[in-house]
Image (tube, rainbow, N blue to C red):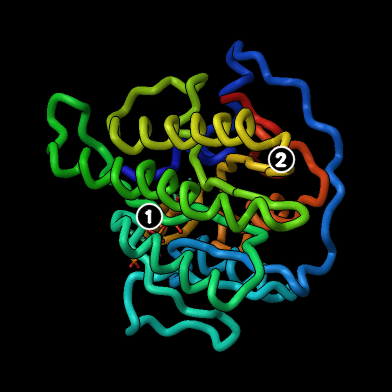
Amino acid sequence: MTDRDADATAAPDARADGGTAPANAPEPELYDDLSGQVALVTGANRGIGRAIASDLAELGATVYAGVRSVAYDLPDEFERVLLDVSQEGDVQEALNRIGESEDGLDVLVNNAAVGHFGEPLHEERTAHIDHTVSVNLRGPMLLCKYAIPPLLTTETPRIVNVSSGMGALGEGQSGGSPAYRVSKTGLNGLTRYLHGEYADEGLIANSVCPGWVHTEMGGAEAPRTPERGAETPTWLARFRSGPGGRFWRDREVIDW
Ligand SMILES: NC(=O)c1ccc[n+]([C@@H]2O[C@H](COP(=O)([O-])OP(=O)(O)OC[C@H]3O[C@@H](n4cnc5c(N)ncnc54)[C@H](OP(=O)(O)O)[C@@H]3O)[C@@H](O)[C@H]2O)c1
């Protein structure tokens, strides 16, 4: 099993079966050029994270690519930063390194995640629960904890949490993968918290489902390319005065 449930193509519209779609958000104002801005993307060596990092670099941002190995081959325009999001020391060091070189941080993209798909909770290995929650939920919380101070020094700080429709409370929530589902529900909760706590200070925090994407996690049958999966996350990273505290897919607000 993969994260296929998350995809709008594979699971056409969970809200068509009786859920209530929220009113859509007003059109955001976007940055067309990110020159002079600094972004940190976790899990940037492959898949959707790499595509988001490439998009942001192409828009002119200085992109810190959070990766777990010095051996990964990265585009020249990426600034490699060693970052296992489950290791608090790595998170602190990564933010320290950015702080030494930059005046602040404009964009944080919490993309890195793992998935142990398939088993229902009573058959799930505890190690899989621990690993999933540690990377998919605790990791983004620590990233936010250490990134918020430098983010709040910039003009329009943005946090993009790459979530999944599998964590949406309006979805059926069956078919196994409990740790992955709950970690993404929790990540959405983090987005709401960030919005509640920091929106008044200018932070724009949003969650996004990239759809079902052909990556190591999404599997070979997934219809979307990583570039397509990166489109809405990159768009959210370009918000200049856009709405925050929402859950998006394909540039539209979806139900939590
Ligand atoms: N693909 C889909 O269909 C789909 C659907 C909905 C949502 N999503 C979400 O989209 C995001 C990206 O998924 P993807 O499909 O691109 O996955 P992927 O190809 O499996 O890539 C996952 C990335 O996360 C990194 N990572 C894993 N554990 C890490 C850790 N402890 N610390 C730092 N980085 C770590 C991996 O690094 P290594 O190479 O070092 O392992 C890799 O760069 C995830 O949040 C996922 O939940 C994906």
208 displayed left or right of 122: right
2 or 1: tag closer to the N-terminus: 2
Q: Amino acid at mark 2?
A: Glu
Residue at x-position 33% and y-position 70%: 68
Toward the top, the furthest residue is: 18
| Camera-nearest residue between 226 and 80 | 80
Figure quadrant, ligand 1: bottom left
x and y percent of residue 209 in the render?
56, 42
| Camera-nearest residue between 32 and 195 | 195
Residue carrying label 1: 217
x and y percent of residue 49 in the render?
51, 62
Q: Assign a secondary structure to mark 2.
A: helix
3 displayed left or right of 118: right
> Are the two marked residues, 2 and 1, in contact with CB atoms closer than 8 angstroms?
no
Residue 218 seen in render: yes
x and y percent of residue 168 in the render?
49, 27
Residue carrying label 2: 201
Q: Nearer the viewer, mark 2 or mark 1?
A: 2
Q: Quadrant of residue 32?
A: bottom right
| Camera-nearest residue between 40 and 26 | 40
Residue at x-position 55% and y-position 80%: 78
Quarter occupied by the C terminus = top right
Q: Dot 1: within a 10 Å radius of its alpha carbon, few (fewer than 14), some, or many (20 or more) residues?
A: many
Q: Is mark 1 within 8 Å of ligand 1?
A: yes
